[in-house]
Image (tube, rainbow, N blue to C red):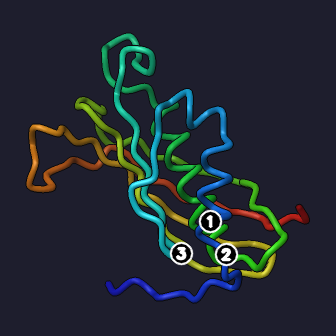
Amino acid sequence: MIAPVYAPQDPDWEARCREAFHAQGMMKTLAAEIVALEPGRVALRAPIRPEVSQHHGFAHAALAFALGDNAQGFSAQTLLPPGPLILTVEMKISLVAPAVGEWLIAEARVERPGRTITATAADVYVADSAVGRGERKRVALMLGTMIAVDG
């Protein structure tokens, strides 16, 4: 399936998104970073560290949720005009495999943009830097609903 191409409404969308991302305490705590940022699509990654593991040693589901939620929010934010901010209204996550590896990567996309409500989705993958060649395994599927609110 070919992903739709969206045009941003804000000429400063990229700077605004990067500034907001770097202002988030949660993303700093998780050592997350932006991997890709384009209109309607965002990818984030964070290292899987002992501080974000669960009792079996896998990455905690909260890490997958936080990355997927944030990536979806920013995918929606990229398409807004200047002024409004995005908040999550609803988020669903399906965990499909244990997250064992070095990195979690959330790739989010806008499924249907709207003036107020935007439907988004994300896939969360686990990867190792040693794997190289882009090999990774999907560990979560996410669907979200975002709302634009006055800043």
Q: Nearer the viewer, mark 1 or mark 3?
A: 1
**Please, is residue 53 above or below residue 84 in the view?**
above
Q: Kindly check if marks 1 and 2 are in contact, taking CB atoms under 8 A apart as contact.
A: yes
Three-letter amino acid code of the residue under disc 1: Ala
Q: Residue furthest top?
A: 55
> Residue 40, labelled with which disc?
3
x, y percent for residue 130: 10, 37
x, y percent for residue 52: 44, 21
x, y percent for residue 120: 57, 67
Q: Quadrant of residue 54?
A: top left
Q: Is residue 110 shown left or right of residue 126? A: right
Q: Nearer the viewer, mark 3 or mark 2?
A: 2
Q: In whole angstroms, how far apart are the C-alphas of marks 3 and 2? A: 14 Å
Q: Which quarter of the rendering shows the C terminus? A: bottom right
Q: Residue furthest right?
A: 150
Which type of secondary structure does the marked residue at label 1 adopt? helix
Which type of secondary structure does the marked residue at label 2 adopt? loop
Q: Quadrant of residue 147?
A: bottom right
- What residue did someone put label 2 on? 12
Mark 3 Cα-neighbour bin, 10 Å: few <14, some 14–19, many ≥20: many
Q: Kindly check if marks 3 and 2 are in contact, taking CB atoms under 8 A apart as contact.
A: no
Residue drawn at point x = 37 percent, y = 26 percent? 59
